[in-house]
Amino acid sequence: NGAQMGCMFSTFLLNVQKAVYLACALLRYQEKEADAVFLILGGARQRELECAAIRGRQNYDGVSTPKLLLLSSGCASTADLVHASGLRPSLIRLDNRAVDTLTNFTTLAFDLACSECTSILVATSEAHMRRAYPLAFIVLGSYGIQVSRLTCPDTFDGHAQEESTIRRVRDLVRALIW
């Protein structure tokens, strides 16, 4: 009886994960072109610098204001990010409150909403994005913030390790409970 309940619960969690991924795929076309904040998820210094360099190479039409570059619990310093991106230090913010992928978003959501941020671009590695994007979509979306994404290469180790399904499901459940 206990094994049957465990199996049913596992099936439920996998269906929740599929529903979130489907919702993300359906809403992908509603992403804004000009995001107010360029959020880099910390975790690997080289990836953080590569994402900052991509941000620095983006062209602006002169009408929209430059995006704020925000590094959440990263390894790089403001000086590192200025060097990699070419941005002025006033356009770079470091936030070190997060302790994991979910708290990258939960610690920032209220602050972003209070600053009237309506859209954000999340930047991280391809392997990490599979877990991070649905979490951002749930947490930031609950504040009315539209989320788009940018994957940065993982050149620091040659290949990125795939994150486990258990880890993704666990964080999805945590985000839904949050």
Image (cartoon, grey):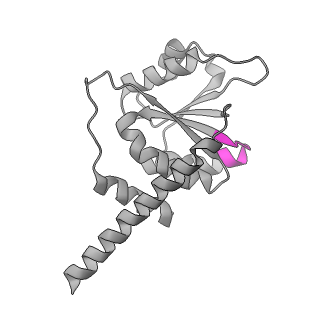
Asked if residue 68 is positioned above or below residue 100 in the image, the reply reads: above
Q: Position of residue 51 (x, y in %)?
A: 47, 24
Asked if residue 173 is positioned above or below residue 39 in the image, the reply reads: below
Q: Which residue lies at the image location 59% right of the left edge and 49% below the top edge?
A: 27
Q: Which residue lies at the image location 30% right of the left edge and 76% below the top edge?
A: 8
Q: Is residue 86 magenta?
A: no
In terms of depth relative to the viewer, which is nearer, 41 or 62?
Answer: 62
Instruction: Look at the image and tell me whether residue 131 can be seen.
Output: yes
Which image quadrant is residue 117 in? top right
Which image quadrant is residue 17 in? bottom left
Q: Which residues are magenta?
A: 112-119
Q: Position of residue 122 (x, y in %)?
A: 53, 37
In terms of depth relative to the viewer, which is nearer, 112 or 53?
Answer: 53
Which image quadrant is residue 44 in? top left
Q: Is residue 113 magenta?
A: yes
| Residue furthest bottom in the image | 1
Left or right of 149 on screen, residue 76: left
Q: Which residue lies at the image location 57% right of the left edge and 12% below the top edge?
A: 86
How many numbered dots are placed on residues in this image?
0
Q: Position of residue 172 (x, y in %)?
A: 43, 58
| Residue furthest right in the image | 63
Instruction: Look at the image and tell me whether residue 100 can be seen.
Output: no
Q: Quadrant of the N terminus?
A: bottom left
Left or right of 165 on screen, residue 150: right
Asked if residue 24 is positioned above or below residue 124 in the image, the reply reads: below
Left or right of 43 on screen, residue 177: right
In terms of depth relative to the viewer, which is nearer, 115 or 126?
Answer: 126
Q: Position of residue 31 (x, y in %)?
A: 63, 40
